[in-house]
């Protein structure tokens, strides 16, 4: 049976008020009394209710982190950056994995509100807002990676449109003219913006946009593999593929190996995200690097600022991506 604060007070020979002051450090208590109270707590195995004490102070020093796919290395790396920045600021992080399910996301947001977290960092499952607008009136919320243009929240994003442009431009400069694109789900803003950048780079180069060279994937390797096989079966197959994330690109590398295509001699491949494994696959993957650590760090910073001042206008931080050239792209074989 759990001990009570009354039993601690009786064992230490003090009042319950004195025990409370020792626990919460709310009034000066002599060192002798403090030691007696601590000894009584240790002997009785008494643990103060940290949540109750936090609620009395109006804060729990916890942050909710909602990810759409914790197994995806990109989200894992962003989550790691969020946790490190939050811990450095004195906050613990509660991780919720929605698996891209809007209903599951809504359920987790409700749970986090019930847990009285001090704020939420959200990478949205999609464009399903649910109770998020109402929740954001109660709790500070910052979104990362995936924009929610229909609700005004602090946001930390990468310039996905520019990233798509850089990837496609790189392939064009290398000499490729049949450049395919395997996208992610169309309802997600990063995927849509990367495809816009792809189209803009083709237009800037004076190349037509061939719709049969644009295939939809799901940001997982198998859909990249399947999409690549569809592209390889065309009467005029592409000599280069821009995959809208690194996992798709890794699937493309697998399909190339299955069909005997040499990379980069016969096929150039560019991914997006620059997850850690991108530099370890063979050949090493050329990719668009997102500033994942800075995205996580800045999301925590924006959330802490919002906790301090709920009246300031929402801020949007759009960070620049960088092209990282590795072994999977070079001038096509003549």
Image (tube, rainbow, N blue to C red):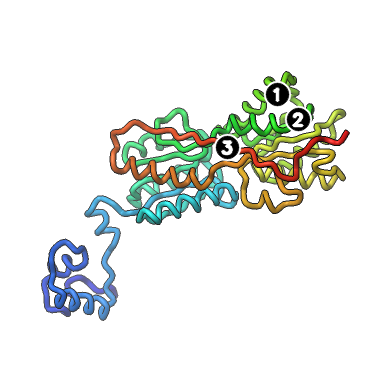
Marks 1 & 3, CB-CB < 8 Å contact: no
The foreground one among 9 and 242 is 242
Q: Residue at x 14, y 76 (%)?
A: 33
Q: Earlier in the sequence, mark 1 or mark 3?
A: 1
How many numbered marks appear?
A: 3
Q: Residue at x 21, y 63 (%)?
A: 24
Q: Earlier in the sequence, mark 1 or mark 2?
A: 2
Question: Is 207 above or below relative to 174?
Answer: above
In the rendered image, residue 9, in percent from the top left (x then y), is placed at 15, 74
Q: Which mark is residue 179?
A: 2
Q: Which residue in the structure is indicated by mark 3?
A: 321
Question: Residue 211, located in which quarter of the rendered image?
Answer: top right
Question: Is 235 above or below relative to 119?
Answer: above
Image quarter where the C terminus lies is top right
Image quarter where the N terminus lies is bottom left
In the rendered image, residue 45, in percent from the top left (x then y), is placed at 29, 76
Mark-to-mark CA distance, 1 and 3: 19 Å
Q: Is 295 left, or right, of 201 in this rendering?
A: left
Q: Secondary structure at mark 2?
A: strand
Neighbor class of circle 2 (other Cα within 10 Å; few <14, some 14-19, many 20+) is many
Question: Residue 306, located in which quarter of the rendered image?
Answer: top left
Q: Which residue in the structure is indicated by mark 1?
A: 202
Neighbor class of circle 3 (other Cα within 10 Å; few <14, some 14-19, many 20+) is many
Neighbor class of circle 1 (other Cα within 10 Å; few <14, some 14-19, many 20+) is some
Q: Depth-wise, is mark 3 or mark 2 nearer the camera?
A: 3
Mark-to-mark CA distance, 1 and 2: 9 Å
Q: Secondary structure at mark 1?
A: helix
In the rendered image, residue 69, in percent from the top left (x then y), is placed at 56, 48
Q: Is 116 left, or right, of 231 in this rendering?
A: left
Q: Is 254 left, or right, of 94 in this rendering?
A: right
Q: Residue at x 24, y 59 (%)?
A: 53
């Amino acid at each position: 049976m759990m001990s009570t604060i009354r039993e601690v007070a009786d064992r230490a020979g003090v009042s319950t008020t004195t025990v409370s002051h020792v626990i919460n450090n709310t009034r000066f208590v002599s060192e002798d009394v403090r030691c007696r109270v601590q000894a009584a707590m240790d002997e009785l195995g008494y643990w103060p209710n940290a949540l109750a004490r936090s609620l009395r102070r109006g804060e729990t020093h916890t942050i909710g982190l909602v990810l759409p796919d914790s197994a995806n290395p990109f989200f894992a790396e962003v989550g790691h950056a969020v946790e490190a920045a939050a811990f450095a600021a004195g906050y613990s992080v509660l991780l919720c994995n929605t698996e891209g399910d809007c209903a599951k996301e809504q359920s987790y947001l409700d749970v986090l509100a019930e847990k009285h977290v001090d704020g939420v960092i959200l990478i949205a499952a999609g464009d399903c807002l649910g109770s998020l607008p109402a929740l954001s009136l109660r709790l500070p919320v910052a979104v990362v990676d995936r924009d929610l243009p229909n609700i005004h929240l602090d946001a930390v994003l990468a310039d996905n449109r520019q990233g798509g442009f850089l990837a496609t431009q790189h392939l064009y400069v290398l000499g490729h003219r049949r450049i395919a694109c395997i996208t992610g789900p169309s309802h997600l803003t990063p995927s849509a913006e990367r495809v816009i950048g792809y189209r803009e780079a083709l237009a800037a180069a004076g190349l037509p946009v061939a719709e049969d060279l644009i295939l939809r994937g799901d940001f997982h390797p198998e859909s990249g593999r399947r999409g690549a096989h569809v592209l390889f079966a065309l009467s005029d197959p592409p000599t280069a593929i821009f995959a809208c994330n690194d996992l798709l690109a890794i699937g493309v590398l697998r399909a190339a190996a299955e069909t005997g295509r040499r990379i980069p001699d016969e096929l150039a491949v560019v991914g997006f995200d620059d997850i850690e494994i991108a530099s370890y696959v063979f050949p090493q993957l050329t990719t668009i690097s997102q500033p994942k650590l800075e995205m996580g760090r800045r999301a925590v910073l924006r959330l802490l600022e919002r906790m301090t001042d709920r009246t300031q206008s929402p801020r949007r931080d759009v960070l620049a991506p960088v092209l990282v050239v590795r072994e999977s792209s070079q001038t096509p074989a003549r």
